[in-house]
Image (cartoon, rainbow, N blue to C red):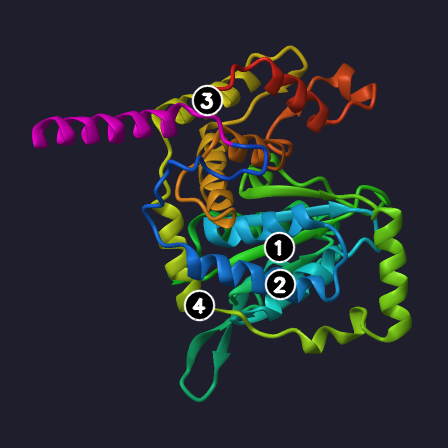
Amino acid sequence: MHIEDNESLESNIEQRALDANASEVSGNGEPSSYFEQRTDLSQVKRSIEEIKSEIGKIIVGQNKMVELLLAAIFANGHVLIEGFPGVGKTLTAKILSRTIDADFSRIQFTPDLMPSDILGTSIFNYKTSEFEYKQGPIFSNIVLIDEINRSPAKTQAALFEVMEERQVTMDGTQYKMTEPFLIVATQNPIELEGTYRLPEAQMDRFLFKITVDYPELDSEVELLRRAHTGSGADSIHQIGEILSSDAIAEHRALTSKVIVEEKLMRYIAEIVNKTRHFKDIEIGASPRGSLAIMAAAKAIAVIKGRDFVTPEDIQYVVDPVLSHRVTIAPEREMEGVSPSKIINALMKSVEVPR
C-alpha cells in the first residue's frame, strides 16, 4: 500500500513538472500554479516597486521605458533614449540616478567637445616634475550623456573602449571603471542640422535603444495637475535612494542565474539569424545582439518576479535590442518604414517555442 502511494506521488510530481514546462505562460506574465520558485526574488521585487514608485512621483506613464532602464541596470548594459524634446528623456535619467546610491555625472555633448573633455587628460605637475592623470566626467557610476549625436566622430570614438571594456587607457595605463557603470545617452530624431550620426560600432554597444513617444491625453492632464500643485519636475529633490552599489551587484548576480531553456536560446538565435536574411534588412545583427537579447530577457524576468525566461520576455525586449543594430534596405528607408516595424514583421515569421 505504501509502495503504491509513493509511486502515485512520484507520478503526480513528474506530471506536474511536465505540465509546468509545457504550459503556456498566462497573459499577465505569471508562471503556472504548478511552478515552484527556485530563487528568492522578494528583495529584488521590493526594490523594483520602490524605484517605480519614486520615479512615478514625477514621471507619468512611460512604464516600458522605466522597466527597460531597470533591466539595463540588472543586465549591466548601456541605454540610448530617443524622443522628441520635452518628453522627459533627461529628467527620467536624472530621477533614476537619484534612486541609486552611486556617483552621477552629466556630459552635455556639443560640436566642440574633445575626447579629453570626457576621458580626462595628463597634466604636468611642477612640484613632482611628473605628469598626473586627471580623470574626466566619464569616471562615475551613472553617466548621463545629453544630445550624444551633437559631437563629431572623434569624440564619439572616445566612448568605444569605456562602453565595451569598462576601462580607459591613457598614456599606456589602464584605468578600470568602478561598478556599477551605466551610460544613459539621449538624442532627438529632429533638428538634424549640426548633428552627427552615431557610428554603427558605437550603436552596437548600447543594450537598448528606447524610443519615447508623446504621452497619452490622460497622462498629460496628470502632468498639468502635478505642475499646478507643485509636485512636478521641480520636486526631484524629494526622490529617495533605494539601491546601493552592493545591492545592484547582488541583483545582477541573481539575474545571471535566471534559467533559459535550450529551446529559448534557439529561439533567440533564430530571430537574430533571420535579421541577416530578411528581405527588408540590408545588414543584420551580430552575435552581440543575441547575447544582448538573452541578458535583457533575464533582467525582465527578474523584474516580473520570475527566475526563468519565457518567450514573452524575449518578445518584450527584441525591438529595443535590435532596432538600432540592423540597417534596413535603402528603398524601405526612403519609404519611411521604421526598423521597429520591420522587426515586428520579422518576429511573425519565427515560430514561438512552447
- The residue labelled by disc 1 is 184
Q: What amino acid type should be assigned to the residue bearing mark 2?
A: Leu
Q: Of helix, strand and loop, which one carries label 4?
A: helix
The dominant secondary structure in magenta is: helix
Q: Of helix, strand and loop, which one carries label 2?
A: helix
> Mark 4 and mark 2: span between their CA atoms?
14 Å
Q: What amino acid type should be assigned to the residue bearing mark 4?
A: Ser
Can residue 6 be found in the magenta stretch?
yes
Question: Is label 1 or label 2 in front?
Answer: 2
Could you say which disc has been placed on residue 267 in the image?
3
- The residue labelled by disc 2 is 96
Which comes before the other along the chain, label 1 or label 2?
2
Image: 337 above or below 240: above
Quarter containing the N terminus: top left
Range covered by the magenta-colored residues: 1-25
Is 47 left or right of 232, judged from the image as shown?
left
Q: Nearer the viewer, residue 334 or 13?
A: 13
The residue drawn where x is 60% and y is 39% is: 203
Which comes before the other along the chain, label 3 or label 4?
4
Is 298 left or right of 107, judged from the image as shown?
left
> Mark 3 and mark 4: span between their CA atoms?
33 Å
Q: What amino acid type should be assigned to the residue bearing mark 1?
A: Val
Which comes before the other along the chain, label 4 or label 2?
2
Q: Which quadrant of the structure image shows residue 306?
A: top left
- The residue labelled by disc 4 is 245
Image: 293 above or below 109: above
Q: Do residues under tags 3 and 4 come within 8 Å of each other at their CB atoms?
A: no
> Mark 1 and mark 4: span between their CA atoms?
17 Å
Question: Is label 3 or label 4 in front?
Answer: 3
Q: Do residues under tags 2 and 3 come within 8 Å of each other at their CB atoms?
A: no
Q: Position of residue 292 (x, y in %)?
A: 48, 37
Question: Is label 1 or label 4 in front?
Answer: 4
